[in-house]
Structures are given as structure tokens and as C-alpha cells.
């Protein structure tokens, strides 16, 4: 399905970095979900480059919801969000050598040179603005159903954030307000300094994002193929720069013994819970009612000012390149919002498949 | 689509550990692909528990191809493979406490207790025999198109295998013959000793599998959602015990600078290639023609003989459990074949979408 | 998705006329649905050639449910049904001239001659046995939810059956027991005589099937593309020999005025109902709670004993052909059961999408 | 997939009659297809109400292609077309009694009253403008590959058009220029008079559309479920007011003998062709290379000025209604363009699945 994700609740993305508008269409949303445009705007603000660790490109992100909402609530028919591209300096971009680490060469190989190469075209992180707006609609609905989610920068430029403490709900609420989402602000400041130091050298850094979802019922996911991990990872690898996804203790499980990795079960408040959560809330591909936990590896932004060897796909010749234009010395803090967005969309889809199309709005299905 | 994977080439799994038969249906295969039953049998043998580091359960895996093959070649219509379950000791399994780390509790939550709980039912690793048989059909066709793939145990019980050397083709060919697939057999022996030591304590170990695919054309995958990483990871998380997937340098990219992580391009044999391969052959979700590389984290087998705290989902009561029956002290060496199989199936699907349904057999489309 | 139909509840078909087994896999069924093997057997008996108006081929249809059922109820995991092909006289069939009106030539064009041509291979009506068995599982569940459906031979060999009278429930129940399903048995006898007369001349006849579904809730279907009519017709055109599908008054609506065709609404038993039902229970692609009504045009069986001009696809030469082997002089009475089956499967899918995966079994979700 | 159609080439619709914009997203198009905006405009003009037999509503249909086209050709990434709604007189529409024959009641049942009821909302024929624009992009590409298609009003208000003559290519070319597409203009004039006469009485009429596709290769379609007839009918029932679809001789086949209905094969120009075409170019669900022929029954426009009995879904009370506003006394001539559009989109999808994603543009894959 290419640029569409989902089965019952679907999202379709379109647009290019330097085209007139980008957008997203969400279909399959329950009718009657309140759509709070100020919440969408706030999520777009969090995604937007901000401060000294982001690109100088500034977009107002003046989105328009052109369908699927009537009198402030979803209608149940496709919801389209359009975002005009205001600040596009096409002069900065011309077809030239492929930027290493970017999709320039692969797009050329796939589209035979017909792709809109300006600013990365359809591959641009700019398109995530539409994804974040779509995710915000769904995220609001999930929150109203008691499902909370949030992401922190677990590691950046080699610096670890603090782990989640006892009060995860409070931590998630706080993270969801922060432009640079860390649990320990001192560590966050160290990360920002490291980003700036790399930027000063014309270089960039990567990091790891850790996401927690609370309130998911047990029993979501399928035994083969449409496992919770499989469906989420399918969506998460769309977040630009994500190169790895692990659930629970992930790669660290490879070094554990079964007696450590198995999460023993006990009873709390009359329901089975696990003592530890090395499996990240998923067993056999299906949620167990514990917090869903996963981590995404985010590679350093490929656009760097340092000189790199590369090839011009049109001529087939080697050349040296310094990437001009406005770029992020790190993408991990902005990718955070995109991770939340695709997570919300994927979960909404799985929940609608399980409980029916009205489920996401059931609490407020009154005229 | 639940227990079906793929769009143009699809695979559907069915069956339970202790039912009469398990099976797989592959649809969308090009007509005219030679089907070599001895190759299928050899792949099933590699999957089968063998030697001192596997369960004592022995299945002859006497598969039958009941449709979709005529006079030794695929017909282009659905190919169904059935495998009878011969050696099922139902007496070993009774509904009881949920085995920690297994799907027992989540299956109960999802299916309300109607699931076939015997031996893990549809969640059993037994079902992977059908998946391996299906994968073998496709793998043979990919090989004939010059696409080679293979997987080694990159790490097990804390012991690293050697990395791939210069001659990857030879390494893959050798790995594809080995029941315990390592590049350095001395390290493999150390791993097996560690597995045995854990088994002797009633415990189990995990590991990491590293897969390489050679010969994939550039330009396969989509920019959003159906990225090469997204589609492959969707399939890979179906391999029992896989809890993490990373492409190229994966999580290690989080600690690199852009100047290290970007793979510079140069020209070799008149085509663009990268100097390094930290991106694992994928940029922007699309193959770049370099070797596709990814790693899967495999958790330790959850079935262990040691006593564990758990809950009986029927009664809702806490209890202590020692898992009886025949179990693997490590699954990583057997998961290897399953990883290869889902990789082959996912790649065949993406290639058929890109090049059309006949592509996989084009070389031999003669009566 | 080729030989798979559905989104939430799916059915996958495999097998060929002269292969060892045919089968169907249903996935996405709610757990806890009672599976009555004698009901499946009775549906297969109704499909089976019977009496003087059918082929002499006799199959015992000794099906086996090999997965997805445990202790008499669905588990919620894939349910596979296998049916061995017992009575295959391969000697009757050899690759030769394309039988006019059959798929012989189109299969050759699509599969380049690799298809299993014996008895029509995967295109054979034989494969509908698996479809009928799958439909029976779902039909039983729909009935238990108060959704009834049935089909009569509205026309055959130019002879009209009587229309439905007042008591549709009783009519459906009676139809569902009849091998040759007509509302007026005298008309049915005339039809059978006309079939026999055609058979005596080596010819065959067609007919029209009319289906009614009672008990469907209002609100099922989508405005664009996945309309109730679109989804059902997608499935119905898989029934061999169906060449037309119309809903409500169908093609007769083309000659009506709006004032006749619009179904005025009134209130009965506190809910809106239509006075007439020219729209067949569907407006704007969505059910309105009235009986769902549609008709399928069934062409005469293409296998006839009369001499026909045709081409041998292998040699590309014209030739004359008399189709040998055992054939039905009419297929309409047997197609009836297949129409019911695909209708049941398509409705189960749409209902599961709307109300969630447990809906079909909710009444009996008790251990 | 609800408001999305297709597998390899997909189209997603959004928008409401009285919202700010409607639109369509086409994904999966080959890169390099020339996009001729004047051709899109001409198709929209043909769809637009025109002359005395259509609604007085006038829309400029000033569409914008906001993504997926670069330097006049498709990029291969999603192509979004937006069309603003200029002439919306919301005052004409208020939530009130359900209009008989419309989706008002079913939308209320499905969306619980949250639907945008103004002018039919998402169910409005207005949305077909986006569908026609999307279809035009694909139609141009099909034409360039030698695949021609067109539709005439085979019957309207009880008056038959002439059948296709010998030169179908010339007929299709002529039809594609006509706002009221008939093969015999004198019959067309009689139809228009009958429409006006009905309109003068406050009533409306229906008709039958007949479509022919030339140039399709043999071998397109699948044996079960994704038959050519099934996929096309799935799409065609989305065309507002279509209530029946038949292929070839369709319902007339029900009254034929096999010896009449079977299309004998002969050899012409070294390839097998059928002598007659009662099967409409499809056998066993797969094209045979003959002209693809189908007919759609179009019901009379439900909006009529005559008084009708109906129910107000909000109050549940019976009431009498005269539908105010601007309406078409017949929709059949406008539905024609929509039929062509969904046909083009469905065929493009099946062809891309069969031959790969580049096929539709192969002839011009040069920079």
C-alpha cells in the first residue's frame, strides 16, 4: 500500500519539500471524536525546528482540516489535513551529486530521475509535519480513552538520559510539553551542548528514543505477521533516520538467561501483571496489559557541512560534496514527535480492528 | 491481514502444535518456478531440532505440496504445503499456569480461553516448519535470480562470532549448509558449550542473528510506510523470540557522527557503490544495491526447567511453575532458518510488486 | 490479494480439480463460535452434483478441519479445511484445444502454459467445495446472530420461479434444505425438464439466482469503494459462471422514474423502514436495515457435448471440439450454495470490521 | 480499505459537498507519465452539469495538482489533486428529513448523526469531481499504452441508443468528446426530451451505461476473488446510482444455451480471438484479449421535487418532503465519466500488479 498505512484506520501521506502543499488523509476514524485544532498546532510546534540545535528553516505550519470534521468532531469519513509550504528556498537545492546517507541516489534508482529532487522531495522530513498533524488527531482520541504515550531522548551524542522513575504518567505528561524531551534536564543540557559542538564542526549526531504506552488493553496483536511488534516497527521505520527498533529489553535480551528475561507473573489489583517488563508489554506478538515499551535507534542527520565523497547519479561521476542549505545537526529530538505520531496511528488501527470502528469515540457518541 | 503476509506474493499460515496438520499457502508466485522438494526437505532439516542443544522432540516433517505445482514447477495458482504433526505427546501439556515469557496469558486474554493451549497451539514454534517450507520455495527462486541470502549466529550466550570476511558469497553458501551457522567454528563450539551449561542448570540463552542479502537491485522499497526496513521488520518480528531488528550498524549509529555514519559513494565497475555500509544497503527506505544487512535480537527460550512465579489465567491465582516437556535451551540457531524464510518471502513480494508477477521466473518461462 | 478475500475475516482458497486435496483457510473468525461438522457436511451435500440435472462425478467431500477448532469451537486462529479429491479420472482430461467459454485459453495466456490444465485445474468448480465448507462455518455463526440468508433459482432456462411471498423467513428456511431451490416446486419441475431437454441435445442452460439476507443491521458498508454492493459483487463474481450482479430492482431501475424507484420511508415498530425495497436494502453503499436483495446472472455451463470451433493454444491452430467428460447441463442450482457462501463470508468480514473481531461470537463467549 | 481503492495503484478520496475542498490522492503511479492538465480539465468539463438536463449548480473545478508531478510528469510518489468548492449554498441544506433513495438515513445510522449532512456531505456526487480528475491522469497513461476506453448511454428513460458498429475506435473517440454520449444522436435527442419531460413533472429518470475497453492484453485478472469482473464491479458500484453491473451479455446469458453463450475461438492475425463476445472479454475472471464490455444500471436521481413520504432520523417521525435545491433530473450522462474514471483506475492497478510499477510509463522512461 506504499504511502498508506493501516487496515481499519489508515493514513495516507502526500507532498514534497518544495511543492505547494503537503498533506495527510486519515480514514476509518470513529465519528464523534472531538478535534482540537490547538492541540494539533501544539504538536506541530513541538516538531518544528526550534532553538540552537535545529535547522534555521521556519514553517508556520498553518494547517487546514478540509474534510472529515464537522462542528468540531470527526464525521467518520476521511479527514484531510493540508499544510502549505511557505518557506521554500528552491535556490538552495539543485539536482546535483547524491548526498551520502540520504535517499538521493535510491530515489534516482527507483524513479529513474523523474523524482522531485528539491530538498529531498517526498523523502523530506518536511512531510512528517502532515504525519504529526494526523497523529495528533488520533492521539487526542487515545488519550481520552485512557491510553497515554510519550517518548524521551534516551541517549544522544553518547549521553544517556535518566530512566523512567516510579511515576510514569507524570513523566509522560511532562515529556509531552518539552521541545527537547528528556527525563533529566541536566543530561538534556549536556546533549544539547554535544549537538552544538558537533554542529560547530559541521557534523551531526544521533541518538536513541524510548517510548512508553500506558493503558493498552491485553490481547491486541496477532500471533503471526501482524504482531504488535511487527505492525509498530513497520510504522516506526518510516520515521526518517530510524535504523533499529527493539521492544522491552531488546538487544540486551540476547545476553540474558531465560530465568532473567522471562517476566514472572503475579496478581495485583485482581489482575495478572508481570514483575519485570523485559518483554516490553508484548508476548507472542500480543499485548499483555503491561506498559508497552520500545526504543528506536536514530542515526545522525546525514546532511553535514563537511566534505564527503559521492557520485552524481546523472553523470555517474565521483565528486566531492559539502551539503549546503539549512540542516539539523541532530534529528533525534524532532523525530520524537514523529515516533509518537506513527505509534498513535498504528495503535488506533489495531484497536479499531479489535473492537470495531466506533470504539475510539464510544465515550462521546452523543449528539 | 493477521496470519497472512504480503501484497503480491502472500503467505498464509495455519495449524497448531498438537493439531493433525500445519500448513502454509503461498499465493502470487510466478508460474514456471522449479520446485525442488529435496531443497525444501533440506531446509526443514536445518530447522529441525538437532544434536545436544535442541529439544528432544523429533518430527519427520513429511510435507506434501498439495496444490500449485504441476510437473515440477509452480503453476502460478496458490501453492499449499501441508505437514502432519506426528510426534505430539498431548499428555505433556494441559491447561495450567501461564508459562512466563510465553503467549499463554496473552492468548487467553485475546481468545477468551477458546485457544488451543496444547503446546502453545498456533503460537508454537512448530508452525515455523510450514513457514520454512514456504520460504524454501521462494528462496530457490531468488537464488536462481542471483539473489543470495544467509544468516549467522552473530552472538550467543555472550560469545561473538567472527564478522563476515571478504568472500561473502562463499560464507553464505557455507552457512546455508550448517545446522549451527557460525562463521568461526571455534566460536560456535564455545557457544554450544555455553548453551549446554545453561541447559544443565535448567536455564536458556539468547543471541543475535545477522543476515546478509546479496544481489538485490537498487530501487526496492517505498519512501513512507512500505520502506524496505518496515516491511522486513514486520515479517521478522513474526519469528518467535525476535525482540529487536536493526539495519546496517543499527543501534550503533546512535553513537556515531554523521561524518562516520554516512556511507560515501564512489564508482566501481561503472556503478555507484558506497565505501562503507553503515546503512545496511537501504537509504530512505529504498535499497541502494549494496548488501542488505540486518540483525535480529533473539531472546532466550522462555521454556525453562527452573521454578518461576506465575498466574493461572483460569483461576486468577498465583502459583509456582516448572515447565515440563521437551524444550530448546536456545532457539537462536533454529530461528536462523525462519529469519531466512520470512526474508525470502518479504523480498519476493516487494520484487513482484516492483517488476510484476512473472519476474521471479522470467528466466525459465519456457514450456 | 488474489485468491484471498476479506480484510478482517479472510478466506484463502487453494487446490486443483485433479490435485490430491483442495482447501480453504479462514482467518479472523471470532473465538468461541461452535463449529458443527454435520452442518458443513449438509452444505457440501447441497453443493454436490445430485440427480439427473448434474454431472455424474461424485465426490464424498470427506472434509477435515485441521486447525482453528478446539473442543468444537473456533479458537480465533486460522481455521483450515481440507477436502481430498477422491474421484479424479485424469484420463478424461488432456491438454488440448481450449474449451470455449472456459478459462482454458485465459489460463494459458496468464500462466504461460504452466497451469495444471486437468479438469480446469484451479479454475474448476471443484474448488467451490472448499469455499462452501468455509462459508458453512461462517453461515452458522451469522444465523446464531439472527442473520438469515438464502437464495432461490429465480429463473432457469427461460422459466421464472415465483417471487418471495410474505413469510420470507419460512421461505429461506425451506430453500436452505432444497437441492434444487425454488419457491414454486411446479416451476422447479419445469426448469428441471428444460435442463434435461437441453442435456439431451448435448447443450446447457443458464439462469438467475436471487438472494435475500434478513437481520443485517443498518450502517454496514462504506461510502466510496467499500460499498456493500461493491464488496459483495467483488465476491460474487468469483462464483463460477456469474456474469452479472444487480441489487434491489437492479437493471429494472434504469426504466423507472425517481418517484417509483425511491423507496419512501415510514415508521414501523419505532424504527424507520422503507415502503418498497427497490434499492435492495442499500443506500449510498450502506445497509438501511431492510432485507438485502440481489440477483446474479449465471451463464449456461460452458462444457457441452456439441461440436464447437476453437483453438489449441499450444499449436495456435483452429480445430473442432466436443467436450468429453462428465459435466453439468446447468450450474445454476449448484451455484446457489456458492453464492450463499461468499455472501456469508463477505458479510462476516464487514460486520467484524464494523463491530470488532469478537462480535460474531459474542453471545457464546463463555467457557 | 474504505475510501481507498487498489493495491499497487491506489486512489483515496476525501471531501464533502460543502466543505472547503475535495481531493484525491493517487499512489503507485509509474514515474515519468506526462500529466496534461488541459486533459484533466476537459474530463472535469464533461462531468460538470451542462445544459438543460443537469443541475443548475456550477463549479469551476479549478483543480490543483499539489504533489507527485514535477516538470510535467509524474514523479512516482503520491499525486494529490485538490478541487475547491466554490459554489456552495449551504442555506439550501439543513438537517431534516431523510431524502428517500439517498444516503441520508444510512449515513445517520452509520455515523450516529456526526456526519456532515450538508448536500449529502461525503456521499455527494460532488466528490466524483476528484475521482474524475484522478481518473484522467491514469486514462491519459492508458491511452498512451494503446488501451482505449469509452462509455455510451445505452439506454435512458426507456429509449435505447444504437449499438456499437464496426469501427469501435472511432466511436470511442467520438464518445469521449460528447457531453451526452450516445452513438446515435437522434436517439440522444429523444433521451434528452424524455429527461426534460420528467424534470417538468418534478421527476427523474435512469438509464444504462455500456463501456468498452480496447487494447487490454490477455491474462489480466485472478481465478478467485480478484477476477477482472470482481475488481471492476467493486469499483463501479462506487459510482453514485449504479445498482447493477453485467459483463458481456450479462443477464441475457441466463436465457441462452451454452451453444449460444460460449464464444467459439478462431485464429485471426496469428492470435486466438473469439467469434462472438458474449463473455465480454473475460473467461474465468481473466481477460482473453477481446474487447472488455460491461454495462451499469443507473437508477433515476433520487432528488426529485415531487412530494414523498419519509422519516426524520433525528426525531424518528414520519413527514412529507419535497426536495429543494438544485438537482439533476438524470445522472446517467454525468455518471458516464465517473464510470470511465474508476475503470481506468482499476485497470491501471491490475496492470501494475501484473507487469510491475513502471509498466504504465515504460515507453517514456527517458530523461
Image (tube, coloured by chain):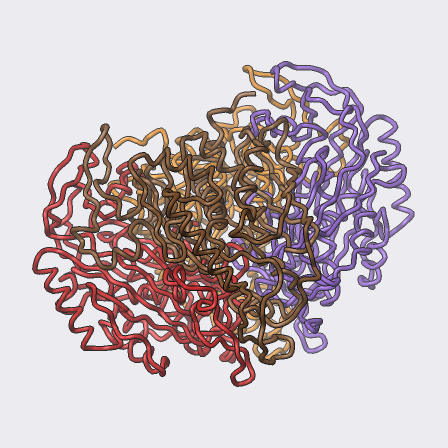
Chain colours: A orange, B purple, C brown, D red
Q: Quadrant of residue C290?
A: top left
Q: Quadrant of residue B138?
A: bottom right
Residue at figure coordinates x 69%, y 48% from the top left: C86
Total marks drawn? 0
Front residue of this view, candidates A341 and D101:
D101
Residue D207 % position (x, y): 25, 62
Vertical arrangement, residue B145 with respect to residue C123, above or below:
below
User: The C terminus of chain C appears in which quarter of the rendering?
Assistant: top right
Front residue of this view, candidates B267 and D33:
D33
Q: Quadrant of residue C212?
A: top left
Front residue of this view, candidates C337 and C260:
C337
Q: Is residue C40 visible?
A: yes
Residue B240 % position (x, y): 69, 39
Is D276 placed left or right of A280 in the picture? Answer: left
Residue at figure coordinates x 49%, y 27% from the top left: A169
Front residue of this view, candidates C313 and A125:
C313
Vertical arrangement, residue B364 with respect to residue C212, above or below:
below
Vertical arrangement, residue C113 with respect to residue A35, above or below:
below
Is C264 placed left or right of B87 in the picture? Answer: left
User: The N terminus of chain C appears in which quarter of the rendering?
Assistant: bottom right
Q: Residue furthest left?
A: D200
Residue A118 % position (x, y): 46, 68
Residue D203 % position (x, y): 13, 56
Q: Is residue A60 visible?
A: no
Amino acid at each position: 500500500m506504499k504511502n498508506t498505512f493501516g487496515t481499519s484506520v489508515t493514513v495516507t501521506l502526500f507532498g514534497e519539500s518544495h511543492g505547494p502543499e503537503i498533506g495527510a488523509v486519515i480514514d476509518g476514524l470513529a465519528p464523534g471524536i472531538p478535534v482540537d485544532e490547538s492541540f494539533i498546532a501544539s504538536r506541530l510546534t513541538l516538531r518544528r525546528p526550534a532553538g540552537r540545535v535545529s535547522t534555521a528553516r521556519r514553517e508556520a505550519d498553518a494547517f487546514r482540516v478540509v474534510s472529515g470534521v464537522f462542528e468540531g468532531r470527526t464525521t467518520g469519513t476521511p479527514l484531510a489535513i493540508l499544510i502549505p509550504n511557505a518557506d521554500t528556498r528552491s535556490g538552495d537545492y539543485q539536482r546535483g551529486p547524491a548526498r551520502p546517507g540520504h535517499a538521493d541516489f535510491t530515489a534516482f534508482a527507483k524513479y529513474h530521475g523523474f523524482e522531485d529532487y528539491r530538498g529531498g522531495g517526498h523523502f523530506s522530513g518536511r512531510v512528517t509535519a502532515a504525519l504529526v498533524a494526523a497523529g495528533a488527531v488520533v492521539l487526542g482520541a487515545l488519550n481520552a480513552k485512557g491510553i497515554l504515550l510519550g517518548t524521551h531522548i534516551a541517549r544522544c551524542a553518547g549521553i544517556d538520559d535518566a530512566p523512567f522513575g516510579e511515576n510514569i504518567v507524570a513523566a509522560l505528561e511532562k515529556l509531552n510539553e518539552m521541545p527537547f524531551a528528556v527525563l533529566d534536564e541536566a543530561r538534556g543540557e549536556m546533549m544539547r551542548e554535544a549537538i552544538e559542538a558537533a554542529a560547530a564542526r559541521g557534523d551531526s549526531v544521533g541518538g536513541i528514543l524510548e517510548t512508553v504506552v500506558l493503558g493498552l488493553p491485553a490481547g491486541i496483536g496477532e500471533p503471526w505477521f501482524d504482531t504488535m511488534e511487527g505492525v509498530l516497527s513497520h510504522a516506526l521505520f518510516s520515521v526518517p533516520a530510524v535504523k533499529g527498533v527493539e521492544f522491552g529489553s531488546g538487544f540486551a535480551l540476547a545476553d540474558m538467561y531465560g530465568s532473567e528475561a522471562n517476566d514472572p507473573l503475579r496478581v495485583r489489583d485482581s489482575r495478572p501483571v508481570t514483575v519485570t517488563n523485559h518483554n516490553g508489554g508484548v508476548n507472542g506478538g500480543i499485548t499483555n496489559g503491561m506498559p508497552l515499551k520500545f526504543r528506536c535507534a536514530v542515526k545522525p542527520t546525514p546532511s553535514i557541512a563537511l566534505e564527503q565523497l559521492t557520485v552524481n547519479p546523472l553523470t555517474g561521476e565521483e565528486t566531492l560534496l559539502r551539503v549546503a542549505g539549512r540542516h539539523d545537526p541532530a534529528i533525534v529530538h524532532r523525530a520524537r514527535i514523529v515516533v509518537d505520531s506513527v505509534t498513535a496511528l498504528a495503535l488506533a488501527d489495531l484497536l479499531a480492528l479489535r473492537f470495531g470502528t466506533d470504539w475510539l469515540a464510544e465515550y462521546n457518541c452523543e449528539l
